[in-house]
Image: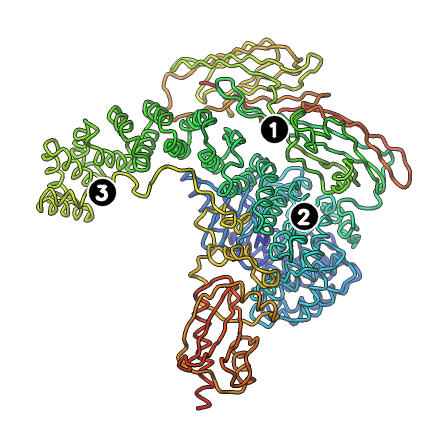
Amino acid sequence: MPYFGSEEMVKELKRALSNPNVQADRLRYKNYITKVIRYMTQGLDVSALFMDMVKASATVDIVQKKLVYLYMCTYASDKPDLALLAINTLRKDCADPNPMVRGLALRNMCNFRMPGMTEYIEQPIVAGLRDKASYVRRVAVLGCAKMHSLQPNTEIDGTIVNELYALLRDPDPVVVVNCLCALEEILKDEGGVVINKPIAHHLLNRMKDLDSWAQSEVLTFLLRYHPRGDDELFDILSLLDAFLQSAHAHVAVATLRLFLHLASAHPAVQADALLRTSAPLLATCGAASRELRFAGLCHVQQVMRSQPGLFGMHYKRFFCGYSEPSYIKFRKMEILVELVNDENVALVLEELRSYCTDVSPELAQAAIAAIGRIARTYSEKCLDILTGLLALKQDHITSAVIQTFRDLVWFCPQSTAAVCQTVEACVDSPQDSEGKQALLWLLGEHGDQISSAPYVMEGYIDGLKTELSSAVKMELLTASVKMFLCRPAETQDMLGRLLHYCIAEEESDVCVRDRALLYYRLLQRGVEETRKVVTGPKSDPSMSVLTGRQEEPIRQWASTFNTLSPLAGRDLCPQTAVVSAADQPSSSAEKELLPESTDVTLSSPDDTEEEISLSLGPPLSHETFEKMWLDLEVLHRQTLGFPRPRTAPDTLQAALQLVKIQTLAFTPGDTVPWKAYIYTRSTGTLILAELLQAPGSDESLVVSVKQQPVNQHAIRVFVSILKSVLQTPNADSS
Amino acid sequence: MSASAVFVLDLKGKVLICRNYKGDVDMSEIDHFFTLLMQQEEEGLLCPVMSHGSVHFLWIKHSNLYLVATTNKNSNASLVYSFLYKLVEVFTEYFKELEEESIQDNFVVVYELLDELMDFGFPQTTDSKILQEYITQKGNKLEVAKTKVPTTVTNAVSWRSEGIRYKKNEVFIDVIESINVLVNANGSVMSSDIVGSIKLKTMLSGMPELRLGLNDRALFALTGRDKGKTVSMEDVKFHQCVRLSRFESDRTISFIPPDGESELMSYRINTHVKPLIWIESVIEKFSHSRVEIMVKAKGQFKKQSVANNVEIHVPVPSDADSPKFKTSTGHAKYVPEKNLVVWSIKSFPGGKEFLIRAHFGLPSVERDEMEGKPPITVKFEIPYFTVSGIQVRYMKIIEKSGYQALPWVRYITQSGDYQLRTNS
């Protein structure tokens, strides 16, 4: 924010910084620099001082250096031409005998986010990778990733990638993890860093040297590794066993995720891992930090999707504390509803009942809704509580109870009689529009069981003029018509008035008027006709006999376990390619080539469909291809409608390579049937295809496509590219 | 984990300081944070994760600050929260108290710390002891390249530097157990557990090897062998320095300790403990005239033990006035800003029973708003005693220079989340 007189201030600072007397007094000079940074922090534009600040970087004082570097990083992208002047100083510092200075200079140089930096930083980074101080190596490794992110579309530098892979064996644990992260960034388009057997085993053996952040990181990377056999699998699991009980919640949960993933073929192992982590998970639910507690609860909810019984005996842990924030209370109530059984139902209901009178109306309503959910199984007890709540005569409670009644009747028709009795006895009527709608629905749908229904309805019709919500008016119309069908004598008059008001008098909302007109014309066609249109099912038709909740397989949620999406709400889940990664049993080799499932952005799949291009990526071995080909299903088969290109095999291969399709093998010359196997990658999926020209099949090529993970859009793109390539040499030869 | 940037905001949503680590999320996105926060707060649907477009804000609140991390990836949320809390921890160790003022007064150090704690969205050096070796608050003094990279940054033992010296070598061991209790309004215990931890304050020279011996009962509980008979500990966690393999094979807890204060291990016992201080309360509210409160506290622990600094917090209606108290011991104070009566008893011997009566006036015009029903909370500390019966049998200290060192052990049982709901 530009302060009044900020220009003056900048001028003054400029004068001071260029004053030789100030420059001579180091302490004074440094104080002025600190002042500049303070203004910068406060949001003032002090970029005009760039030249003076560059000069100040030539100092032995490390803090001053840091401040100047910070200043440069902040304004480099605004003043690229001036920033170039600073580069010389920085490069000189990169060769300083003090490793601290080297690391600092290199890190900041890499943080200059401006185009054209690459040529200046490449050499210092490469030197930094071989620095004898691990502090510098850490910085240099991440510098590689920063360099790549500056120019994301350039060709990947193979030597740097190799160097980074070599540095995975660095003695310094942070260098190792930084390498993984950097490789992941650089190789993003090719599915990220490759975790093969030696790397995986190396990482597993280093686990205990790492700090908790690094452990979490490595555990996530290991998700990509698939052991070759059960022996190896169990060796890995026993190595990781101790981390299930790690002091850091995030490590324990990351380990659990890896366990679930590795043991996807061994449900017993998975169940055991879940059982053993249930204690640490519960502990996170009681963590001192409310955010971690919240994360823990979300994880518990995920686990419960597969193992609803796991936390049954610990239900008391999910009772809400008085001072907990409501987002925690909401989750706890959701969990409590799931945990209810014959033994604890009384206690749980008593607990929920006490939440219904909470100060926060949202929370009270959620608690009432929770009781409503339990009522689907234990209707009698719950109805007593809900009826008791009506006696409190609190508007928001009454409204929530009526809404809960409506849902209950819809899902659980056997409770209708009891509900109707209560509604009949209820004197208070809800004041908000949701509550009114719920009450009107109940009156309309079950008017035959509520003797006072027409009189209540009449009250609403008489008060129509003061009603603001059109949703309530529409509900009132529908309810009145339904009521008319079952109790015509009592309703006819008021229905007439209602329709007259909505159609002829000043009803401003068109939707309401249209609805009224619809009913009016419908009634003109006769009562039977109306009945056919208006009456629907009185309860959820999809409900059959009440059963317990379906237990989902673990793989349904394992892929998003320990990520952001379960916290951010279920609809954010990236349900695109991610799930299938865990779905298919796959060999270790292909696992290496798959993209990391966690780092998929939380965007909807549509966003990614804009641009799909093919890419080559690391070559597949024949064995891997064969294995995958046998494992996967054909997703798409199409007759291309033209014969195979009659060109030399080399030409065809080159043509395919141009559009980034790799050829694995094809049958020589004129052998019949002619076959070719090709593959390519596209936005995180691997596409395998077979071209076949069988005799007698009209001399036309048939393409069969297999893919992992599935992305139909990518297949369409692939096939269309393939078609155009294959036709080109055909046209040439003819 | 990939946090793109970290921000520190004041209560009005103004950015006090920030650090852009990855550059893949526009820094101006933070402007949406506060609007979203306000909007959610109004709807009563506050959530520690908020999203604006493809940007996610993960935030925590500490005193009068918001600490926010932005990301556009499906990051590991618990990791990000842990990191934010780590920031709080490190800043607190530097500035004693982390609040708006300390950030503004120390922005140079904050920048330096932010620079070392994370790079490109990945946590780097987060141990505050190590950081303190090379980022200091000399304030106005010049630091002429004293700055060697501390060996710990690259050490094999990442939690301890070499070359530490003390004149007198000592270790202080604190065994602390916190009791969490939730008691229903009708007096039944809803949940209770013990959270224990063994804390060390190490003042030892060199690279000492320590071995901690616990009593058998504790060990059996730890390993869960003796199920049924004794209580078994759930969720035992050791500091990174403890050699887990040694513990697995022969049950010895051996380690090279971090210097200064650290938590060696923690555990949780989920068992039905008798609430050490039992509270019975009668709160009678006569609308428009007065509230009468009677609270009886009883020490349900051994007669030889004494609970110190007992504080019993009794909620009162927010519109109550003119307090009058009568206590059989200790003294009572009305804290109107928290709507509480705090009854403090300096020393509370086991088996004793004390009583307080309080009387408040109520205004004749009643407020419309509903009030919550806050529970009675109790704070206490009982020295020389643990509920679980865990005991330190020995602590062996071996260093290659062969010095003699003294271990000191202290036991404390204290209140954790200790709540008793009331009827009113």
Where residue B270 is drawn, which disc sits there? 1
Where residue B325 is drawn, which disc sits there? none
- Residue in front for this viewpoint, B172 or A515: A515
Q: Label 1: chain?
A: B
Q: Position of residue A283 (x, y in %)?
A: 59, 36
Q: Using the numbered discs, state the Cα–Cα distance from disc 3 to disc 1 in whole angstroms.
A: 52 Å
Q: Are marks 2 and 3 in contact (CB under 8 Å)?
A: no
Tag 1: amino acid: Asn
Residue behind mark 3: A536
Tag 2: amino acid: Val
Tag 3: amino acid: Gly
- Dot 2, how many residues are within 10 Å of its Cα: few (below 14), some (14-19), or many (20+)? many
Image quadrant holding the C terminus of chain A, namely bottom left
- Residue in front for this viewpoint, B244 or B116: B244
Observer-side mark, 2 or 3, equals: 3
Q: Label 2: chain?
A: B
Label 2 sits on a secondary structure element that is: helix
Q: Position of residue B302 (x, y in %)?
A: 68, 14
Q: Does residue B67 appear to the left or right of B156 in the view shown? A: left
